[in-house]
C-alpha cells in the first residue's frame, strides 16, 4: 500500500522542479511587469489580471474628470452631428435650425430671453417650495394618523391622475391669469412624488428601532425628529430631484394657458411666428433652468445626507 501511495502522489522535488521550470523557461514576451504603490513584480500575463488592483492618489480625481468629460464629449458630438446633418441635407431653418444659429440667437436675443426667464424662474421656485412643503406636512399627518391617510390619500391619487394640461385651465379660471395660477400648477406637479416618497421614508423605520424607542420611553416628537425624519431624508431628496425638474414644466404649462411674459409664453409666440431659432433657444434655456435646480438639490443632498 505504501508503494502505491508513493506512485500516486508526486514527489516534492518534482513539484519544485516544475515551478522552477515554469519560472526559468517562460518566454519574456509572455511576462508583464505589474507596478503597485510599494514596488513592482514580474508575473506571467495570464496571472497579471488576477492581482488585486492598487489605486493611486490620482485615480479618484481622474475618475471624476472622466465622469464629467464623457457626458460633455457626448453632448458636443451630438451637436456636431446635428450641425453637419442640417448643413448636409439643407434642412430649412424654420424646421430645424443648426446649433450655430441657435447659439447666435441666444447671444442676440439675450435681453428678451432674460426678460422672460425671471418670471418662469420665480414661478418655478415658489411652486417647488409650496408643493414640497405641503407634501411633507401631509406625509407627516398620514404617518401619524392612519385614518387621515385612508381618507385623503385616494384623493391625492385621483388628482394626480388628471393630466396637467387638463387641470391647468381649471386653475386659471379659479385663480385668474396672474402669478397665483402658475405657482399652483407648478406646486401641484411637484406634490405627489414628494408625498409618496416622504410617506415611504417616514415608514421605513424598522419595528425593532421603534420598539427600542418605546422601551426607552421616547416621546412621539423624539421618535419623529431623531428616528423617522433622518431615515426619510434619502427618500425625500430623491423626490426633490424629480420636483426640481417638473416644477419648471408646471410653470411653463401655466404660462401656455394664459400669460404675456415667461418662457412658456415666449415658446408659444415663437412657434406661431415660425421663429425656430428663438424657439430652440428658449427650450434650451428652460432645460438649463431645470438642470440648475437639479444640481442645487444634489449639492444640498450631499451636505445634509452624510451617511
Image (cartoon, grey):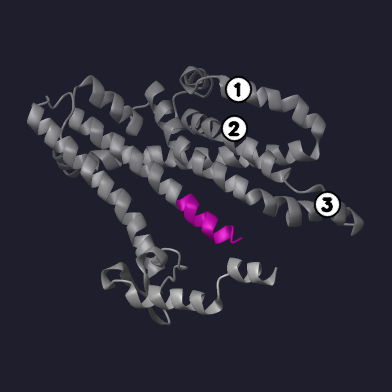
Residue nearer the viewer, 86 or 143: 86
Q: CA distance from mark 3 to mark 2?
A: 29 Å
Q: Earlier in the sequence, mark 3 or mark 2?
A: 2
The quadrant in which residue 159 appears is: top right
Q: Residue 149 lies in magenta, yes or no? A: no
CB within 8 Å, label 2 to label 1:
yes
Instruction: List the residue tagged with mark 3.
Output: 208
Q: Is residue 36 visible?
A: no
Looking at the picture, does residue 241 appear above or below residue 182? below
| Highlighted magenta segment, given as a residue range | 296-307
Give me the residue at 50% from left, 20% from top: 163
Instruction: List the residue tagged with mark 1.
Output: 159
Give me the residue at 51% from left, 79% from top: 13
Horizontal side of 141 relative to 93 (left or right) equals right
Horizontal side of 294 relative to 196 (left or right) equals left
Residue nearer the viewer, 5 or 141: 5
Q: Residues within 10 Å of mark 2 (few under 14, many from 20)?
A: many
The quadrant in which residue 66 appears is: bottom left
Labels 3, 1: front one: 3
Give me the residue at 39% from left, 45% from top: 291
Q: Earlier in the sequence, mark 2 or mark 1?
A: 1
Residue nearer the viewer, 77 or 214: 77
Q: Quadrant of the C terminus?
A: bottom right
Q: Residue 302 lies in magenta, yes or no? A: yes
| Badge count | 3
Q: Residues within 10 Å of mark 1 (few under 14, many from 20)?
A: some
Q: CA distance from mark 2 to mark 1?
A: 9 Å
Q: Quadrant of the N terminus?
A: bottom right
Instruction: List the residue tagged with mark 2.
Output: 192
Secondary structure at numbered mark 3: helix
Amino acid at each position: 500500500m505504501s508503494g502505491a501511495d508513493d506512485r500516486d502522489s508526486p514527489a516534492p522535488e518534482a513539484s519544485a522542479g516544475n515551478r522552477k521550470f515554469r519560472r526559468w523557461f517562460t518566454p519574456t514576451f509572455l511576462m508583464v511587469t505589474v507596478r503597485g504603490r510599494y514596488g513592482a513584480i514580474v508575473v506571467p500575463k495570464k496571472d497579471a489580471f488576477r492581482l488585486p488592483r492598487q489605486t493611486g492618489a490620482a485615480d479618484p480625481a481622474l475618475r471624476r474628470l472622466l465622469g464629467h468629460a464623457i457626458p460633455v464629449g457626448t453632448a458636443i458630438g451630438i451637436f456636431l452631428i446635428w450641425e453637419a446633418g442640417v448643413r448636409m441635407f439643407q434642412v430649412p431653418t424654420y424646421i430645424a435650425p443648426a446649433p450655430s444659429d441657435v447659439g447666435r440667437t441666444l447671444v442676440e436675443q439675450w435681453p428678451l430671453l432674460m426678460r422672460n426667464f425671471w418670471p418662469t424662474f420665480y414661478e418655478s421656485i415658489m411652486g417647488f417650495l409650496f408643493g414640497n412643503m405641503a407634501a411633507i406636512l401631509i406625509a407627516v399627518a398620514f404617518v401619524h394618523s392612519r385614518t387621515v391617510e385612508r381618507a385623503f390619500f385616494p384623493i391625492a391619487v385621483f388628482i394626480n391622475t388628471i393630466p396637467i394640461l387638463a387641470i391647468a385651465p381649471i386653475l386659471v379660471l379659479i385663480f385668474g391669469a396672474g402669478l397665483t395660477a402658475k405657482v399652483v400648477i407648478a406646486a401641484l406637479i411637484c406634490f405627489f412624488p414628494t408625498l409618496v416618497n416622504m410617506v415611504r421614508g417616514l415608514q421605513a423605520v424598522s419595528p425593532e428601532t421603534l420598539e427600542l424607542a418605546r422601551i426607552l420611553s421616547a416621546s412621539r416628537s423624539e421618535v419623529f425628529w431623531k428616528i423617522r425624519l433622518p431615515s426619510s431624508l434619502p427618500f425625500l431628496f430623491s423626490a426633490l430631484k424629480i420636483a426640481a425638474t417638473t416644477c419648471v414644466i408646471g410653470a411653463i404649462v401655466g404660462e401656455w394657458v394664459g400669460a404675456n411674459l415667461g418662457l412658456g409664453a415666449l415658446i408659444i409666440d415663437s412657434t406661431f411666428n415660425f421663429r425656430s431659432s428663438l424657439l430652440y433657444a428658449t427650450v434650451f434655456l428652460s432645460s438649463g433652468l431645470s438642470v440648475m435646480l437639479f444640481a442645487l438639490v444634489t449639492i444640498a443632498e450631499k451636505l445634509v445626507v452624510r451617511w
